[in-house]
Amino acid sequence: KTKVTKEKIAYVYNVLFPMFEEGKMSKKEYDRRMAKLFGISEKEVDWYGNFVKYAKLNKPIFRLIERLRSKGIAIAYFSNVDKSRYMHMKLLLKPYAKLFDYSFASCYMGTRKPYKIAFEKVLRKMRVNPEEALFVDNEPKNVEGAEKAGIKSILFKNNKDLEKRIKGYVWQKA
């Protein structure tokens, strides 16, 4: 029987998970540590299997991305993700790959959202200044991190809200 405590969850969330997503820990090591921490087998951790089972694309958002691209706006996605989930994500996004000028994965960057250095790396690679960028994310801490890096940001709530909020920012600029 697993023994889950607030302390263990905090350790996973604040220590193990960031190391895993920054590419500083292999999947095997992550599974080993998780199994030991919770008293389960490594096979029971099944992080990747659950991701594959439950990860879904927000397909309607691709119409908005197409409209943004038609205005000449460069589009990137930036994900806090380990290497195995990133490869699966690339497969899911393959039909939409032409919509993205850039893709950024924390596991290859060695840092992750919400850290300022992560946003600075993205901006440098895209060759844009912070005031020229717009960041959208569903995590408040990531939006706050982008804003600390000087990037205008929108907290994603739903597609309709995003469309409305982007209109006021993008359509006037493009």
Image (cartoon, rainbow, N blue to C red):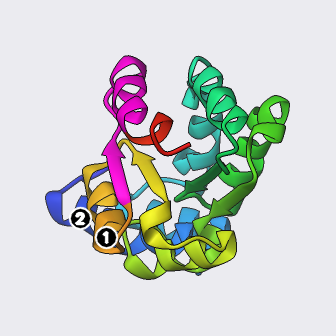
Q: Is residue 122 above or below residue 62?
A: below
Q: Given the image, on which type of amino acid does mark 1 rest?
A: Asn
Q: Is residue 154 left or right of residue 94?
A: left
Residue furthest to the left in view is 6
For image coordinates 49% across by 62% down, the residue present is: 132
State the separation of the CA atoms marked 1 and 2: 6 Å
For image coordinates 41% across by 35% down, the residue present is: 166
Name the element at disc 1.
Answer: helix
Residue underneath mark 1 = 14
Q: Position of residue 63 (x, y in %)?
A: 64, 21
Q: Position of residue 57 (x, y in %)?
A: 61, 27
Residue in front for this viewpoint, 99 or 58: 99
Q: Is residue 89 among the parts visible in the rendering?
A: yes
Residue underneath mark 2 = 10
Looking at the rendered image, the quarter that the N terminus falls into is: top left
Q: Is residue 25 among the parts visible in the rendering?
A: no
Neighbour class for label 1 at 10 Å: few (<14), some, many (≥20)?
few
Q: Position of residue 143 (x, y in %)?
A: 32, 55
The verdict on residue 160 being magenta is yes
Q: Given the image, on which type of amino acid does mark 2 rest?
A: Ala
Q: Position of residue 103 (x, y in %)?
A: 70, 57
Q: Which mark is residue 121?
A: none
Neighbour class for label 2 at 10 Å: few (<14), some, many (≥20)?
few
Q: Which residues are magenta?
A: 152-168
Looking at the rendered image, the quarter that the C terminus falls into is: top right
Q: Are marks 1 and 2 in contact (CB under 8 Å)?
A: yes
Q: Splitting the image into 4 quarters, where does residue 155 fall? A: top left
Q: Is residue 137 above or below residue 144?
A: above
For image coordinates 31% across by 29% down, the residue present is: 157
Q: Is residue 63 left or right of residue 118?
A: right
